[in-house]
Amino acid sequence: MPAWPLIVALSLAALLGAADTTPAPAPPPAVFTTVTIANAKARVVLSTQRGGIVRFELLDEHTTVLSLPLRRKAGVNAAQPGDEGKALAVLDDFLRNREHPEYRLHNFLTLANKAPNIANTSNRPWEIVEPQGNRATLRLQLPDRGLSVSLAYVMDGALPRVHCTLTVTNTSDAEMVITPRVFPVVGIHQDYAPGETTYVCAALHTGGSQGSLARTDLPELSSQTEMSKGGFDYAGVKSRFFAAIWTPTTAPVDGTSAAIKRDEPGAAVVAQGASPAGITVRAVRFDGPTSELGSPVPQIILSADYPESTVKPGSSRTEAWSLTCVGMSKDALLPLSEAEKRMQYTDGMYRFFKILATALSWCLDLINQVVHNYGVALVVLTILLKAALHRTTFKQQESMLKMQRLAPELKVIQERYKGDRQQLGLKTMELYKKNGVNPLGGCLPILIQMPMFMALFQVFSHNADMRGAGFLWVSDLTLPDAVWGPTVSYLSWATINPLALIYIGVTVWMSYSMKIPEGGDPQQAQMMKMMRWMPVIFGVIFYAMPSGLVLYFTVNAILSTLEIKYVKKKLGMT
């Protein structure tokens, strides 16, 4: 029998065997859908991916469209022209993390430790159950793991708040230890991230309506900070003008009970019940995608680990919480509890100047109700403050004039007693007393104005009611007024901010118009020469500050120039 038929048969068998070893095609990617629930204040978009929240929009807030130079530095999440008037997404897809794709969601869940791990079920779509406009339930069936997991979402009856109920059912024949971990907040909206990094923080409130708020700053990149292991009222993440508040409860809420007592102090605690003990809350930092000019956007992820519990076959474990997103404007904060309102004071300096800053904000709002423009209201407020402090300015200039006139006599005393510091001090004070001169008179206006300046800085840094308010070429008084900037990263700082440049020009002209007195104190003359550089230094400091604050200082500098000329003329100094 010839050998070739056997060779052909073996060759065909080898070819068929090779075909059989070809890897099977990859399964198609999972298709996820969304469902939207809403009330009069907010709209929440839920995803069948991990049952999480894709987006939490506030219907009463609006997007802020940055100028092109600021938009280049702010990152890919900055609003574009045409987005004006759209509902603002306080929670959205901010991280876009390739290593952790689940971080595009909020309020997503993992079950770890001794329970069957559902962390690797991100490709399994959840089922949407009973969507009804203001509520929906998302369910994940895991028969191979003996688990059924559901997240029920119900919008609050009056607030921008969604109530969530987690139910984990043991469908197996054996006891199961279940440890839920929730990631309620994964980053928060920032109008202009390069200027808001210092405002981004996590916060934890304890003690009910009479309690206190503790701030946790941005941790190091990819690291975490443990905030609490015990009972607390709520935890949250805050940016400059917005906050997301996560409140665990001891029982599910039907969406109406929080609205019944919302006006009472501590309503968040009274209406929703005290938080369960033993929840470990952590703040984790991740940076979002880089901007056009290469700057990453820092974000905080809030995670909460519930204590483990044993669930018998056929039984369930239920946990409940609420998630509230809110702006820091007066109207937005009004219906919240006293405990929740404290989220606006995560900044310690703002809390320190609270009384004065509140008074200045009240005056600014009152003027704005008349002139209907915050920029004009700011100019009017500056004029009123200058008028209120005119007397102290007059005293300052009068003290300076007397000091100049006494300069020759003071020089004689300094020469006569230069070897006896004690006698020099006594004779100098006798000279001042004889001529009615207060050597601290020139410092008094500064001591009065410094707290006001600091309080005004806090007003322009935290007053959310001014957000989006424009004036002349300024599109938003809470942001820098950059009108042009280079497109290369190493020159991204070199923007043109007209208000800061006007301030530098006015103050430099004002300082050089002040003549140094002849024959006066050499130290005073040297000090005046050094002071001529101060406007440039302050102008550089102001360059990246809110344009409203720079507008105040610019108008104040112009008024100060006119005022000093008037005072000098009245005192016969010109």
Image (spheres, rainbow, N blue to C red):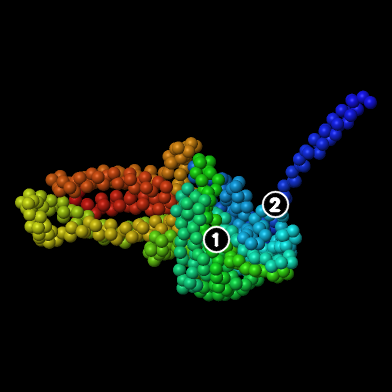
Q: Is residue 71 visible?
A: no
Instruction: Find residue 282 and report its horizontal and vertical position in percent.
Output: 52, 60
Q: Which of 228 and 127 lies nearest the eye of the viewer?
A: 228
Q: Is residue 444 above or below residue 532?
A: below
Picture residue at 28% right of the left edge, 53% below the top: 563
Q: Is residue 419 left or right of residue 528?
A: left
Amino acid at circle 1: Ala
Is residue 283 shown to the viewer in this render? yes
Please provide percent x and percent y for residue 4: 89, 25
Residue at the location (67% across, 63% down)? Answer: 151
**Mark toward the viewer: 2 or 1:** 2
Residue type at mark 2: give it.
Answer: Asn
**Residue 483 higher or lower than 94, as above or below:** above
Q: Quadrant of residue 309?
A: bottom right
Q: Nearer the viewer, residue 389 or 332?
A: 332
Residue 244 shows which numbered tag?
A: 1
Q: Which residue is under mark 2?
A: 123
- Residue 371, how many percent across, how many down? 45, 58
Q: Residues within 10 Å of mark 2 (few under 14, many from 20)?
A: few
- Residue at 45% x, 53% y is 198
Q: Tell me what residue is drawn at x 75 percent, y 46 percent.
A: 27
- Circle 2/circle 1 CB separation < 8 Å: no
Viewer-side residue, 435 vs 292: 292
Q: Secondary structure at mark 1?
A: strand
Spot the residue most to the front: 1
Nearer to me, 554 or 533: 533
